[in-house]
Amino acid sequence: MFSDVPIKFKARKGNKIEEKIKFYIQELDIKFPIVLIKDDLYLIGSERLNINMTNDSLMVRVGGGYVKFEEHITKNDRYYQRMLVVYMIKSGESLEWVIE
């Protein structure tokens, strides 16, 4: 099901955070969507999370602190995929519809 990303990430030119996200999507072979909502808020899989840049490291706000983007994604990859499948089953809709 997650052989390809349903929504391709489009980095805005000159935006260091988004260029780094695009790099990690390719480097870590991320198959779930990462979509800008507004400012530094992104939809990652089915969660809304803040992403910031600190000393050339991409950081994700989780709970009361920050963790490195690549560590968070690697650790939670299966969780994000599973949650999207759960939403598909509950709604009876396609992956693309759930993400929209």
Image: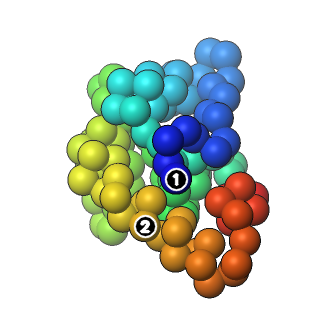
Q: Which quadrant of the structure image shows residue 96? A: bottom right
> Considering depth in this image, is 43 or 98 the residue closer to the camera?
98
Give the farthest residue toward the top: 14
| Relative vertical location of residue 17 with respect to residue 43 in this rendering, above or below | above
Q: Which quadrant of the structure image shows residue 58? A: top left
Q: Residue at x 70, y 64 (%)?
A: 94
Where residue 60 appears, x then y in whole percent? 38, 49
Q: Secondary structure at mark 1?
A: loop
Give the labeled residue for mark 2. Answer: 82
Q: Residue at x 33, y 68 (%)?
A: 63
Where residue 76 appears, x then y in whole percent? 31, 57
The disc labelled 1 sits on which kind of residue? Answer: Met
Sort mark 2 into few (<14), some (14-19) or many (20+) by Cα contacts within 10 Å: some
Q: Which mark is residue 1?
A: 1
Q: Residue at x 59, y 78 (%)?
A: 89
Residue 72 visible in rendering: yes
Compute the Cα span from label 1 to label 2. 11 Å
Marker count (numbered)? 2
| Relative vertical location of residue 100 with respect to residue 11 in this rendering, above or below | below
Where residue 92 appears, x then y in whole percent? 70, 78
Taking the image as shown, residue 6 lies to the left or right of residue 77, namely right
Q: Residue at x 66, y 42 (%)?
A: 7
Q: Secondary structure at mark 2?
A: helix
Q: Quadrant of the C terminus?
A: bottom right
